Amino acid sequence: MRFLSELREGLGIAWNAILANKLRSVLTTLGIVIGIVTVTLMGTAIAGFRASFLTAIAAFGTDVFHVQRFSWFFESEQDWRDASKRQQITFVQVEELARQLTLSESVAPVAQIGLSVGYADRNSSGVQVLGSTDQYLKTSGSVIARGRFFSGAESSGGRPVCVIGANVASNLFQTLPPLGEAIRVGDKPFSVVGVLEKQGGAFGDMGADDIVIIPLEQFRYQFWSNPDLNVQVKVGSLERMDEAKEELRGVFRRIRGVRPSEADDFSINQQDQFLDAFNRVLAIIGSVGLFITGLSLFVGGIGIMNIMFVSVTERTREIGIRKAIGAKRRAILAQFLTEAAVICLIGGLMGLAISFPISLALQSRLGGAMPLSVVALAILVSLVTGLASGFFPAWRAARMDPVEALRSE
Amino acid sequence: MGRKLHAEAPDPRRNLTSPDVSLILIDKLARRYVMGSETVHALRGVDLRIERGEYAAIMGPSGSGKSTLMNLIGCLDTPSSGTYRLNGIDVGEMDDNELADIRNREIGFVFQTFNLLARSTALHNVELPLIYAGVSFDERRDRAVEALEHVGLSDRMRHKPNELSGGQRQRVAIARALVTRPSIILADEPTGNLDSKTGHEILALFDELSTKGNTIIVVTHEEDVARRARRIIRILDGLVESDEQAKVQEQPAMTRV
């Protein structure tokens, strides 16, 4: 009860003090406003970056293992050198693997090469040509937008057919219908049977939509007879992941003739690893970014502290009066803390009023509007800034000697 | 001037101490200030006893130590040596917060310069001690309104100090002093900033408060202000120079109707 009355009193005093010094309050608040604007925009950018990354990585599929010569992440240079001495993964090994696995749904070998593709007088370079089997549709999680994926018969028969990514389709055909047309891959003709749905996301720019998929048999015949294969193994159930991984590892070691005393001569990669690494990087970027933008908030806080010292000095007599009629230290402390907190809170709300529309306007660049968590955090941070920067001035006011304070002009 | 003055006796809750304990009992009270390399002896050992219901004036020229004595009696300051018992409680040993509590409950200050909060209404100024006492909103409002009515300002409650005359401001201050029903009303040159007519009105108010049983201590250097009290304590060079009881018959009663 007493606390509430004192808080009410504190809020009333704070409001009066702010109104009495409008220009000064506005100038002081400006530091907090700028601080909150930069911090919230930074927070929004980080959240947006994270969200678009997660969308992109979802395309990898959480229940898919990528068996490769190389690990996605190397702990040291030595690891990398060891890995580069490993034997290539051959098509025969993959066929054997597919036959022996019991806990996984589908297995697809993938070979990859960069080539230019063309149709009529149009050419598109920097396209990744993937050689795989009909199983690729399942393991990759790709979705067909138009037409179909090539069949098992087309795959094993090595037919010159292809499925093209969304960007390839729009680059080569623009508005024309691509299905049934023959495109040039390298300089070989392939007939388009399907078009993939656009993937976009953070990796959209990195080529997820700039691909052409052809049967592995054709790939080996036309471009690269003995490619280094990656193997995509889709488990189909997140509950079986650990057993499936153990089985995959045991079977593949046997196929590759790894002796029990030797380490694996291949790596089983999975999305989790990627996510972990990404989270680590994001944490560093995030903390550095927030630290730098937080500096502006810190400067704003110093401004508040300065003005609170002025305010305390100006109102020494008032402090004396309040103490004479029975205000305890705590009440005086609370009064000035409340004032600082109110100024900062107003600054924080003004900052949000500026940065929220900006985040809406830059939605596409930032990867989303400001999340509610950032809004809540901004309010909290401005409150804490007020309390922190108001503490020393308020402490000084609380400790004033009433006789001295009453004597001041 | 036919105001009905409601001046309650001190809160009965506070009569924990037996009635034979003096309200103020001061023993060899001294206060020294260190100013650079010099030590100033403001009070050099004052003995003083003031009973409930007394109306006393403390007089002395500037530099005599009367302000220091007032600060000590008002619990704004603590003595360097000696004891001060208020209602039998030794105040000298108290810390900042305990003193604030004592000031809030036991002392009602009336200052020469009124010392009202400039940006607050009369009502809020009078409510303020009750806020710090933790009194609920409704009771606070009722008691503040009552106190303002008793000093004759029921039509000025929503006015701020700069919209009031000097006399009205001092009445607000008196209402603020009365609202907590303190043991002592401690007035420091209460008429110093007022013209003589207004000053007399304020002094008449003190007379009435006194007859209703309030203990009043007025610090002043004006003889005619001091003569309104029934006891005059003169301070000189940090010591009590004289302490005389005025005869009751000499009380000027003509200002009261």
Image (spheres, coloured by chain):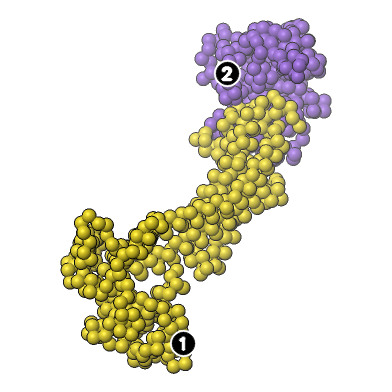
Chain colours: A yellow, B purple
- Which residue is denoted by mark 1 in the rendering? A123
Chain label for disc 1 = A
Q: Which corner quadrant of the image does residue B187 belong to?
A: top right
* Element at label 2: loop
Viewer-closest of A29 and A223: A223
Does A348 appear above or below B32? below
Q: Which corner quadrant of the image does residue B166 belong to?
A: top right
Does B169 appear above or below B229? below
**Left or right side of A395 for B156:** right
Whether pointer 2 and pointer 1 mark residues with C-beta atoms closer than 8 Å, the reply is no
Q: Are marks 2 and 1 on the same chain?
A: no
Q: Which mark is residue A28?
A: none
Please indicate, yes or no, whether residue B88 appears anywhere in the rendered image: yes
Does A295 appear above or below A393? below
Q: x, y percentage for residue A308?
A: 66, 40
Identify residue type, mark 1.
Answer: Asn
Crowd class of label 2 (few under 14; some 14 to 19; many from 20; radius 10 Å): some
* Element at label 1: strand
Does B177 appear above or below B78? below
Chain label for disc 2 = B
Identify residue type, mark 2.
Answer: Met
- Which residue is denoted by mark 2 in the rendering? B94
Q: How far apart are marks 2 and 1 (CA)?
A: 92 Å
Crowd class of label 1 (few under 14; some 14 to 19; many from 20; radius 10 Å): some
Q: x, y percentage for residue A333?
A: 59, 34
